[in-house]
Image (spheres, grey):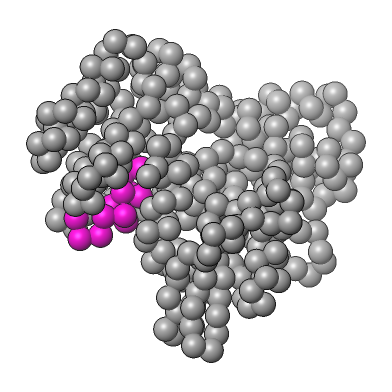
């Protein structure tokens, strides 16, 4: 049962692998007819090195054309993925001896843009980019009945849009958790609710259809928020640059904190890639990178850093 945003996203994908299929189809990948995606056996994500493990490995069972899909949940920008994602994918390709695909899931727009532009190999005449399922491709589910009919799809929607204080989606996600029931359903309610701001959580409690969720779980969370004076449940979901907003408890501070965190992550990723590729960067050039507040330009520089031979090529105008 999930207790954090990362675990929740992985569990939702595990229980609703059709989301992975749809992401592949949107990218132009059609799996063989009759393919049924399901998680492979225990330890399937474990690679040779003990510190490398994929979040999820799905086995596409088909009569004649097996397929394997590596699923990765990504909450922030990490330059290290330039090296680990190809490792995950080709290890599974070798293990299963069949076509393999990498699908990255993220609730953050900036992380999705970064992941879509990431070229994970310098091999000539080849391209290796992840298929990315970002918030722009995750449907808002607001109908409680549809949520109950497909609860894990609704819970994935709830995880993504609760970060945006979307009370309608959160209400549908609570209905999905109610349909699951038991202690697992209660944990999903707590996880979704913990991603909402206090104001949105209050609205969600008032609109919740499940009496237990309305009268006990959400009320307890509101009381805890009042005592602590913090949005503690947002800790992982808003990890990227939300410290100011979390401390201040105001939307304006939250946006500022998230923007600052994204800026620092992009700058750090760019400089790390340049260092890994042994490209010299002067103190003046470092200052230019650190001083750039345009995230689109930083993403452009990240793309260039994957193939450039000099820092001047990366930072050139145009």
Residue 270 pos. (x, y %): 72, 38
Left or right of 272: which side holds 153?
left
Q: In this view of the protein, can residue 312 be seen by the observer? A: no
Q: Which stretch is magenta?
A: 148-160
In this image, 82 relative to 216: left or right?
right
**Could you tell me residue 7's position as x and y percent?**
45, 44
Instruction: Tell whether 120 sits left or right of 27.
Output: right
Horizontally, residue 6 falls left or right of residue 316, namely left
Tell me if I can see residue 278 in this picture: yes
Quadrant position of residue 245: top left
Pinpoint residue 60: horizontal percent, then vertical percent.
50, 74
Q: Residue 17 falls in which quadrant of the image?
A: bottom left
Which sits in the foreground, 281 or 112? 112
Frontmost residue, 117 versus 120: 120
Asked if residue 154 lies in the magenta stretch, the reply is: yes
Quadrant the C terminus occupies:
top right
Dominant secondary-structure state across the stretch colored magenta? helix
Q: Please name the residue shown 30% across and 41% down the image.
A: 188
Please say whether residue 250 is one of the residues in the magenta stretch: no
Count of numbered labels shown in the rendering:
0
Classify 36 as above or below 148. Answer: below
Q: Using the rendered view, name the quadrant where residue 251 is placed.
A: top left
Which residue occupies 31% across, 25% down?
197
| Residue at 45 percent of width and 27 percent of height | 235
Residue 126 on image: x %, y %: 75, 68
Furthest toward the bottom, the residue is 64
Q: Quadrant of the N terminus?
A: top left
Residue placed at 33% from the left, 11% from the top? 229
4 w.r.t. 19: above or below: above
302, 2: nearer the viewer: 2
């Amino acid at each position: 049962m999930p207790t954090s945003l990362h675990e929740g996203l992985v569990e939702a994908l595990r229980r609703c692998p059709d989301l992975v299929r749809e992401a592949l189809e949107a990218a132009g990948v059609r799996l063989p007819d009759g393919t049924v995606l399901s998680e492979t056996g225990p330890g399937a994500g474990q690679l040779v090195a003990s510190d490398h493990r994929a979040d999820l490995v799905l086995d596409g069972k088909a009569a004649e054309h097996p397929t394997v899909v590596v699923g990765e949940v990504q909450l922030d920008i990490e330059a290290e993925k330039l090296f680990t994602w190809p490792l995950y994918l080709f290890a599974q390709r070798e293990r299963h001896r069949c076509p393999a695909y990498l699908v990255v899931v993220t609730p953050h727009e900036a992380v999705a843009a970064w992941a879509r532009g990431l070229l994970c190999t310098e091999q000539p005449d080849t391209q290796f980019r992840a298929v990315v399922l970002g918030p722009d491709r995750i449907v808002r589910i607001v109908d409680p009945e549809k949520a109950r009919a497909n609860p894990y799809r609704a819970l994935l929607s709830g995880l993504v849009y609760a970060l945006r204080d979307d009370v309608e989606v959160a209400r549908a996600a609570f209905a999905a958790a109610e349909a699951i029931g038991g202690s697992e359903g209660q944990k999903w309610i707590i996880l979704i609710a913990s991603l909402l701001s206090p104001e949105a959580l209050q609205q969600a409690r008032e609109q919740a259809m499940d009496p237990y969720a309305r009268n006990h779980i959400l009320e307890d969370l509101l009381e805890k928020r009042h005592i602590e004076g913090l949005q503690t449940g947002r800790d992982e979901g808003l990890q990227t640059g939300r410290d100011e907003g979390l401390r201040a408890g105001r939307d304006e501070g939250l946006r500022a904190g998230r923007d600052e965190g994204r800026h620092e992550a992009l700058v750090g990723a760019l400089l790390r890639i340049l260092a890994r590729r042994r490209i010299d960067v002067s103190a003046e050039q470092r200052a230019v990178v650190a001083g750039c507040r345009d995230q689109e330009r930083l993403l452009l520089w990240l793309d260039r850093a994957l193939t450039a031979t000099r820092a001047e090529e990366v930072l050139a105008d145009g």
